Image (cartoon, rainbow, N blue to C red):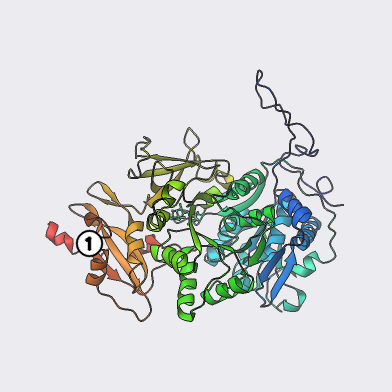
Amino acid sequence: MFGFGKNKGEPAKAGAATTPAAAAPAASIPRGLMVGRMQDWQLTVDKVLDHAKANHAHREIVTRSVEGPIVRETYGDLYARARQVSAALLEDGVVPGDRIATLAWNSGNHMETWFGTMGIGSVLHTVNPRLFPEQIAWILNHAEDTHLFFDLTFIPIVQKIHSICPMVRRYVLLTDEGHMPRDTGIPNLVSYERFIAGKTQDVTWGGFDENTAAGLCYTSGTTGNPKGVLYSHRSNVLHTMFSLQKDCMGLGVEDTILPIVPLFHANAWGITFSAPAVGAKLVMPGAKMDGESVFQLLDSEKVTFSAAVPTVWLMLKQYLEETGNTLPHLKRVVIGGSAVPEAILKTFEDKYEVQVFHAWGMTEMSPMGSMGSTVPEFMARGTDAVQKNKLKQGRAPFGVEYKITDDDGKELPRDGKSAGHLLVRGPAVAGSYFKGDGGQILDKDGWFDTGDVANLCELGYMQITDRAKDVIKSGGEWISSIDIENFAVGHPAVANAAAIGLPHPKWDERPLLIIELKPGASASREEILNYLNGKIAKWWMPDDVQFIDKIPLGATGKINKLSLRQTFKEHKLPTIQAAE
Ligand code: ADP
């Protein structure tokens, strides 16, 4: 039998929870307080898959494989194969705490690698393949990954980086022998199917402290080097529980879930854990996320719930409009990662009868930070009011605390107007970065500054008005670049929009609106400004509009404002002369 004690190395705190019926440890409870007499059932993620196997063994995981065909397995199969991954890793010398990297799309194989790694106390490190190869190599070296599991799609990346990643001693190509390419030049390369073939399922999972590290995900690092967020088993399990609240993702065994948001983007917003926890059927999109491919899966697998960034919904919306197809099965979608444009919200709700939930979060929050559920006070106000309110980022699920402060750290009122720095606290929020990078990241009361600027209303709705670094400061007041962008993309000719602040002698900064038009569409500066007129406050109106071919996006699909500021740094606003 494989497992701790039979291999080199030790779990982070060995022996903390080997007997599930043991009482909670009393060591940290001060004298005078009573010790509770409940079981010490450590919150480790292997228990999620144990539960799925025991209760939902026949529910399916369906993958559109990178090789082409649709592949079907059950939670029972996934459990068995994940244990084989564990055995293969242990046989290959992996010890608890080792980092195992993946460069992979959402698939059953990726899930098996995920649970197979975490179950034995090693750390699953998802890497974003949309980064440049040099950035990927930097991250692999910083994490000191020993193994890299990757999809066929990413062979060219691995060919570029293997010679500069000396710590990686095994490359596992997530495919079978029949699809193994010849002469890749990648050392110590083995196919996934060969790697796990014939391996025992008799391995020990869990049995270590719930604070043991389980996963690693780097932030995109738009300023400075990327920083690693090191999730623990406990943070993942608690995140799973609170994301399952009815007013959060509210998933159940009757759901068929298509997580389009990648596993490499903050744990696919936790769905890798929450779906097996409730036995929901999973549909994994593999490499294809265009409108047609997404529609095919939604339709053929009768998907009821999905989650993705606005860009994906925009592509699906365009596809549906071109083909006249509809969404008879889909009931709910979560949209987050960046603000939901009104046009997307209204189209999906009004035309396709799909309920839209706006979510906000970040890698450092595991990532769920809010969900746009509707409180009864709003339901009574009618559809328009409800939809308008859904453009806000939503409310805190139990397990997340908010505080809004001004520049001096003074807490601002929950009046729906006062915008300030959004601070968060909770058991699934980062306490520090991997290797201590970035130093102390919490204030003295344990609050983490999200870098977002937001307001909070008395009903608990939080509205992001900007990133602290993107806010446009005009005459001492803050203008929300996000609001301007959201309205601008509502114009029928506009594909994407970005607002940035440019220096202004009188006002300090004034907004410049940058527009990418839809292919073949046209619109003038005046048309855009007229369209915005009356939708946003007068003093928020952009001082100028510029058109570019393509708005640059970062690796997580968000607008790269750093690059736009660089491009337009010499641009002189036409209002400057008037002010001088
Ligand atoms: P990265 O910071 O690496 O780009 P994250 O996914 O961690 O990737 O990004 C988190 C940030 O994305 C948040 O701090 C916020 O600025 C932005 N964001 C996420 N969801 C939303 C949303 N619904 N509306 C507006 N901004 C969002």
Quarter where residue 384 is shown: bottom left
- Residue 549 left/right relative to 333: left
Q: Work out whether residue 189 can be spotted.
A: no
Residue that carries the numbered disc 1 in the rendered image: 543
Quarter where residue 300 is shown: bottom right
- Residue 333 left/right relative to 47: left
Who's the residue at 84% across and 62% down the image?
Answer: 199
Who's the residue at 35% across and 36% down the image?
Answer: 408
Which amino acid, mark 1? Asp
Residue 558: horizontal and vertical position, in percent?
Answer: 44, 62
Residue found at the very far right of the displayed protein: 1
> Measured along the vertical axis of the image, is residue 469 above or below residue 458?
below
Front residue of 458/167: it is: 458
- Residue 575 left/right relative to 56: left
Front residue of 147/462: it is: 462
Residue 184: horizontal and vertical position, in percent?
Answer: 68, 76
Front residue of 6/498: it is: 498
Residue density around tag 1, few if under 14, some if 14–19, many if 20 or more, within 10 Å: some
Residue 225: horizontal and vertical position, in percent?
Answer: 49, 54
User: Which quadrant of the figure contains the C terminus?
Assistant: bottom left
